[in-house]
Image: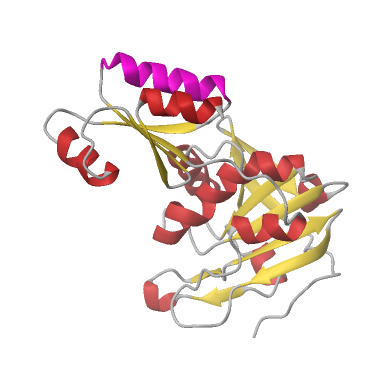
């Protein structure tokens, strides 16, 4: 079992980072002093769960965290600054401050440095998240000690629900479209007009009919719009939905 450090100060560490191709020291005070901070730590950049779920969801919910009093969101990993910077670019994680704990000093100070030599990783961080106010840990979510890489409690939704159970989360919107389709363009313009941030999935002629037919229950015309897992339909159906 790992020690829960709620009520304690975070370790005093200086992180070596690269900004604009120059070395820059970033201290614990720089990151936490006088701020409300959400921090999540994970085993490694570019690894599957970290890249597919953990980091992206924190990046996606960053505006909701900001509306609920969080000044910044930090991602800590026992990786060097070059790796962390490239991972941030790859993930387009502009809302996240990447913290390279290359020597594992911060993670060790938190008592969460673990040996993953069996995977060829060496010493890495156990997965966890915490809410820190002015350098003092208010709340920690530490993953249970199990085989593998458990991911059950350190996710962004759990943390946001702790901060504010009624916080408004961004809608999940996907538009299946085709290039040059005027109705697709109109549908996307409507979504933008109503403040929806959407993912556009353009489909070519070879697969469009099969894909749209499969996801929409037989309708093979573009666009097809989904909001929070619910099929809204094409441009006209979207217009009626938004009119409500």
Residue 35 spot, x, y in % from top left:
83, 46
Q: Quadrant of residue 11?
A: bottom right
Q: Is residue 91 left or right of residue 104?
A: left
In the rendered view of the protein, which quadrant contains the N terminus? bottom right
Q: Quadrant of residue 213?
A: top left
- Residue at horizontal 43%, vertical 40%? 90
Compared with 76, 68 (above or below) is above
Residue 178 spot, x, y in % from top left:
25, 24
Residue 61 spot, x, y in % from top left:
61, 45
Q: Which residues are magenta?
A: 180-194
Q: Main secondary structure of the magenta part?
A: helix
- Tell me if residue 80 can be seen: no
- Residue at horizontal 67%, vertical 44%? 168
Looking at the image, the residue that sits furthest to the bottom is: 1
In the rendered view of the protein, which quadrant contains the C terminus? top right
Compared with 192, 210 (above or below) is below
- Residue at horizontal 54%, vertical 30%? 196
Residue 3 spot, x, y in % from top left:
72, 80
């Amino acid at each position: 079992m790992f020690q829960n450090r709620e009520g304690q100060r975070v370790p005093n560490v200086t992180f070596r980072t690269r900004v604009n191709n120059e070395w820059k020291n970033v201290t614990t005070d720089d990151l936490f002093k006088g701020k409300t901070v959400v921090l999540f730590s994970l085993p490694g950049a570019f690894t599957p769960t970290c890249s597919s779920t953990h980091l992206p969801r924190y990046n996606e919910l960053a505006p909701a965290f900001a509306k609920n009093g969080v000044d910044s969101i930090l991602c800590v990993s026992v990786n060097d600054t070059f790796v962390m910077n490239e991972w941030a670019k790859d993930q387009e994680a502009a809302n996240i401050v990447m913290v390279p704990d290359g020597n594992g000093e911060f993670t060790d100070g938190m008592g969460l440095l673990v040996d993953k030599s069996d995977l060829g990783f060496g010493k890495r961080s156990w997965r966890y998240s915490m809410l820190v106010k002015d350098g003092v840990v208010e709340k920690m979510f530490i993953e249970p000690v199990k085989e593998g890489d458990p991911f059950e409690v350190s996710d962004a939704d759990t943390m946001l629900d702790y901060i504010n159970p009624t916080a408004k989360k961004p809608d999940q919107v996907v538009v299946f479209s085709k290039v040059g389709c005027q109705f697709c363009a109109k549908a996307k313009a409507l979504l933008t007009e109503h403040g929806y941030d959407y993912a556009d999935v353009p489909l070519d002629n070879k697969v469009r009919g099969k894909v749209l037919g499969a996801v929409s229950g037989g309708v093979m015309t573009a666009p097809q719009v989904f909001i929070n897992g619910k099929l809204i339909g094409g441009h006209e159906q979207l217009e009626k939905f938004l009119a409500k």
